[in-house]
Image (cartoon, grey):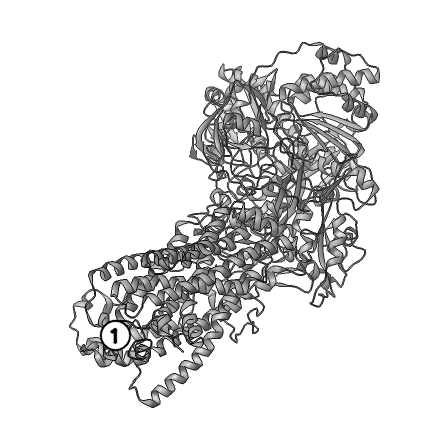
Amino acid sequence: MYNRRIRGPLIEGNRNIGDVTRDVISPLESAPALWWYIAITLTTIATLYGAYAIYITVAYGIGTWGVNNSVAWGWEIINFVWWIGIGHAGTAFSIFLLILRQRWRTSINRSAEAMTVLAVMCAAIFPALHMGRVWLAFYIFPYPNTRGPLWVNFNSPLFWDFTAITAYLLISASFWYLGMLPDLGTVRDQTRSKIKKAVYGFFSLGWTGSSRQWLRFEALSFVLGGIAAVLVVSVHSIVSTDFAVGVEPGWHSTIFPPFFVVGAIFSGFAMVMTLMVIIRKIYNLTNYITDNHLDAIARILIFISLIMGTAYLTELFIALYSGSNYEIFTVFSNRVFGDYKIQFWAMFICNALIPQLFWFKSVRRNWMTLLMVSLFINLGMWFERYMIVITSLSNDFLPANWAPYKATHIDIGVYIGTIGLFATGVLLFMRYIPMMAIAELKGVVKIGTKKAD
Amino acid sequence: MSKHREKSGKIKLPAESDPENDPGLPEIFEDDFIKLNASRRNFLKAFGYSFASAALLAACKRPVIKAIPYADQPPEITPGNALYYSSTYFDGHEYCSVLVKTRDGRPIKIEGNSLSKFNGEGTTARVQASVLSLYDDSRPKNPMVENSQASWEKADSAIRYSLESINLSDKQIVLLTSTIISPSTIGLIGQFGREFRNFRWVKYDPVSYSAILQANAACFGKPVIPDYNFRKTELVVSFFTDFLGTWVAPVHFIPGYVARRKLNNGKTEMLRHIQYESGLTLTGSNADIRRKIKPSEERILLMDLYDRIAKATGSETFGATAFREDLSGLAESLVSARGKSIVVSGTNNTEIQIIVNGINSMLGNYESCIDLVYHVNIASGIDSDMESLVNDMSEGKVGAVLMYNVNPAYDYHDPQKFIDGLKKASLSVNMSDRQDETTGIAIYECPVNHYLESWCDAEIIPGQLSLAQPCINNLFDTRSFQDSLLVWSKNTMTWHDYLADRWEKEYFPKSGLPSFRDFWNESLSKGVFNYQSSEEKVSPINNRLVSEVMQKKMQASAEGFEIVLTESIPLGNGRHANNPWLMELPDPMSRHCWENVASVSAADAQRLGLVDGQLINLGQGILLPALIQPGQADGTLSTALGYGHSASGKVAEKKGVNVYPLAGMEGGNRTYNLTMPGIQADATITELALVQLHSSMEGRPIVRNTVLGSYRKNKSSGNEMHEEFESKHKSLYPELIFDGFHWAMAIDLNACIGCHTCVIACQAENNSPTVGKDEVRRNRIMQWIKVHRYYSEDHDNPRVYFQPVFCQHCDNAPCENVCPVSATNHSNEGLNQMSYNRCVGTKYCMNNCPYRVRRFNWFRYTNNKKAFDYNSASDLGKMVLNPDVTVRERGVVEKCTFCVQRIQAKKLEAKINGSVIKDNDIKTACMQACPAGAIVFGDLNDAGSRVSELFRDPRNYHLLEELHTLPSIGFLTKVWNLDEET
């Protein structure tokens, strides 16, 4: 089973069960520090800027963006795919590591899942906002109506997309929230504030910790986890069909579903890494989120990075192999050596080359390098989406239609707004929700320690 | 007419709320209510009131807006049915016999009059857009005396009084007009002039043909522009002549030219076209061989050519200096095409025109291809007349200036001199149907009707008459120019009676019809009347004059940059600058709009360090943005006239630069070429409003083309891959079956000359909005048709390919399956349909359309006074809208519909009449407007239809057919008249 000599203890510092509860709940109980107030002010400003950009978009039209009649999708779709990708990590963590019996996931899964919910919320803003007539967005719901009834187009990837994202948001939010019930009960029991007691009491749905409740809790987690596992794979596969079903050169490719799923998990894990390094530093949670944890994430990142590199090279090869002039033009003349070479090489370097630094143990063990590399991956993944969306559209089949794309401050505003929303959500999460699954941590508190031996 | 119906035919809506009868707020909600004690009683009172009013409001209906029918319906009007009236378009510069489509009493579309021998069903972009000028808000709306509103009676009596008193003095009474081709108006002017002792009629054309008129007067004794008959021609050699775009009568020349270029019915012979020019023109783009020369080289070339031809034909030679290129081949081919060729020059220089006349005369072209007898009656302005008038005016010799349809304050080369001179006249009257720079300078403004509100006639070619009739009541308090003349000469007749009277006396006897009523009604309904005009034969060419010119020593031309001023395809001579459709019409070659640019060659740009959009200083305060134009002769700069208005309405104002001041006089004619010692680049770089940024086909089979030599051997030459692609079309899905109609279109790229008429015709038919310069820069132009222009790889002097691209109505359309709400779908007649109501604007269809023909309403382009104040923002401008086509809301995607409203109308008509739709019954707007007949629409299920026939042609291919989109539009390969691939 678990070999301590190789892996070390899952939780360091000889914490006992009581310590775990206290450690995790303490940020909820103590008054927030000054940095927290400063941070939330900044993130709120960013969110409000986004709200302003959204107001302008809805009030005046999508014309306020940089999109045009040749490049009809721009930053908003890039950001949508980027956020959805980030939103993969939480569920992937919880489910895949659960299936693979990687019990070290317990100190990370709660934050990863919170990140998922927030990222999917941010992502969901974009497709809606991207509609020319957002007030008629309900047309995309397949509901019985008096217009015929007129149904949606079940052949359209955008409809699949809508279904997949809605399902994913619902399942991952439920999974996250229901998984939190025992911990909310713990907070309710620990707190001295009457208000908190009432609020946490309400949200803990009357958790008492009885055996029967635990039994049902486990069963529910199992069912939701089972569904979520499928969704993790399906969501980004379906997002990829938005492109793969299209005829545009550079889009029309069967590699897209697995390539997108892997890319999504890559960016999600990178984002988890970013957040964990920060949270661990701020709250001094080195006992729970140990160097070994970060090391494990880094190893996963190298592995995925190799897959990404392979995928990029496969795309180049297939473009050549296809013999299609349009594909060859888009991939080589346009991406690798052409107008968009900056984006292509930024993507390639950030995603396929920089993560290779994780082969060195010293890089994996240094929080600064971990943070830097994880940020590079996030940047690289943004460029990857930029490259896919823009390069194919701007220079496609008929050269007379070629047009460049340039984002406006409204495009940027919406993006900053979602980053603000995400960061605000993370700050609120740190403040009001137990950052780690207390109940599950208690299950692994002794694994790998000397006492257990 | 009901009381809600105004004169304009617009239905006025009842006011939504009447402030006087507004009951206001009930007492309970007035200020002191707040101060009341919040007792239970008061609370209940307020609560009860709120509840009751909420219930009441919820039960209220929205105000009912009633459309009130005619109390007395005119018998010819059936609401919802269009009526067509024949009429004549002539703006002083361009002529077209037209049909005017009216709906509920308002003209909404112009079509060509197929009964016209002159232009047939063809039109040009300017003609198509003229309907919008009718609904121009800035049109002068009533007579003005010294810039204040006045009544016609007051203005008339004052003008009459002044005319009488000036007539007593020795001063001239001058009528200054554009060219007038209406025989009745000419008669009326003669009659008007006879009332005065010193009357003078000066005709002034800003873009003039006075050199041709004078050369022909000198050579043949007849000051006319000959008719060029391209149908009988084998070889056209043209120098600086844009006869397909702007020169004389493109709408007349295009059908003839294209008839000799089309390779239908198994033809294997084509007209060969050789063009010499500096800037790339539409005509030059279509030439088989195009050579770049500077304007200053034209005369040397022509003299050399003259000598060579003279030698070959045994005429007198003059030992002219040889041109830098060897012209023996050109001379040889001209001589071998003797009697079947045209040599033409558009340069406004009498001597050059005389040499050209000499060449044509030696070649015997006057017998067959160039007709001086039945000439084109399009321009009669002599530049020196205008110059002497302006001199007389500044010397105070002119007492009265009556101006009609001219704008010398804008387009005369020395506008200030003209304006100062005008102030010296004791009477000045301006008669214009539009607001322009000359408006407000004269003492009296007597605004005239738009041509769609007027009676008139025209004789474009001797014996080819046409009538113009009003299609709507006068929108404003305007009066026709002819009515004004009649009133001022104390004639009690109306212009209509005068016109009818004249037709009764002059033309009715020639008709052979029993009564004048019949003749008049028939002529009005047909719009045209042809009779055998007995024109005198012209005298043979005056050879003495030719040899005089040939012997003249050439003056050494000044060193420097040569500037060529041209008319532009969108704006012509600039009269229509306030028309937003034309302003936003891209130039076919440079693909920019909303301003004029200075086209320079790449070599010059490199030498001067210029980039696209960088300003060039031409002196006199003229700063023009540069455009690096492939095919521009080195050392020359071309720019378009007609832009840069200062007071011609909101659309025209400050768009581009007015370069008319550069067109000075030389040898008694206005010259549109000048030499500048040098030009300077300015540091400022502006952003051009370009609709196409990339010009190379990148080796893709987009415009497939071949040369005639190969075509003769193999009909599918250049189109070999078509068969391969066809054979590879395999699908897992069942084939679509169209059991009724299967609409399709064939576009002959050999006939399409790239004139952009279809673009405006489509815009007018389908209510496409104008979006403005900024939106064009952002690549958001809304026109459904884009005429793509590609250059061949030789950037120095490229071959030019035009290809109109709009929705291909693919039978396997990539846009259809990706729309999440099924807003775009396929009809069982093969149409790719767009339901605007259902569209939520995901724009996925736009991305997935490989042809990029879908347009998105990025903003609210209509009803938006703030940002898009063009025609669709004003009540008047909106009257041009076609009621059969939905005006699209912000946030929806739109595109070509194959004019589904026209298809439906004809189907309905056939159903009601119990008839069958025949081929050619249904014409899309682009097809109908095309002067070249390049577009053929029809039913593929009918094997005998023209479109089926063209689809079977070995030249037919589909754009991007390798994608298996199965488009319903076929293109026929472009064939250049060359023996072998160069």
Relative image position of residue A195 (x, y in whole percent): 21, 77
Count all numbered tags in the image, as a single digit.
1
Relative image position of residue B536 (x, y in whole percent): 79, 23
Q: From this view, report whether residue B462 is shown above or below residue B668.
A: below
Task: Report whether B751 appears left or right of B24.
Answer: right
Q: Amino acid at mark 1?
A: Asn
Task: Report whether A313 appears left or right of B932.
Answer: left
The residue beneath circle 1 is: A14
Q: Nearer the viewer, residue B395 or B750?
A: B750
Task: Report whether B238 appears left or right of A205.
Answer: right
Task: Report whether B192 appears left or right of A376.
Answer: right
Relative image position of residue A87 (x, y in whole percent): 42, 66
Q: In which quadrant is the N terminus of chain B drawn?
A: bottom right
Q: From this view, report whether residue B583 is shown above or below residue B636.
A: below
Relative image position of residue B784 (x, y in whole percent): 59, 50
Q: Chain of mark 1?
A: A
Q: From this view, report whether residue B192 is shown above or below residue A287.
A: above
Q: Secondary structure at mark 1?
A: loop
Q: In which quadrant is the C terminus of chain B drawn?
A: top right
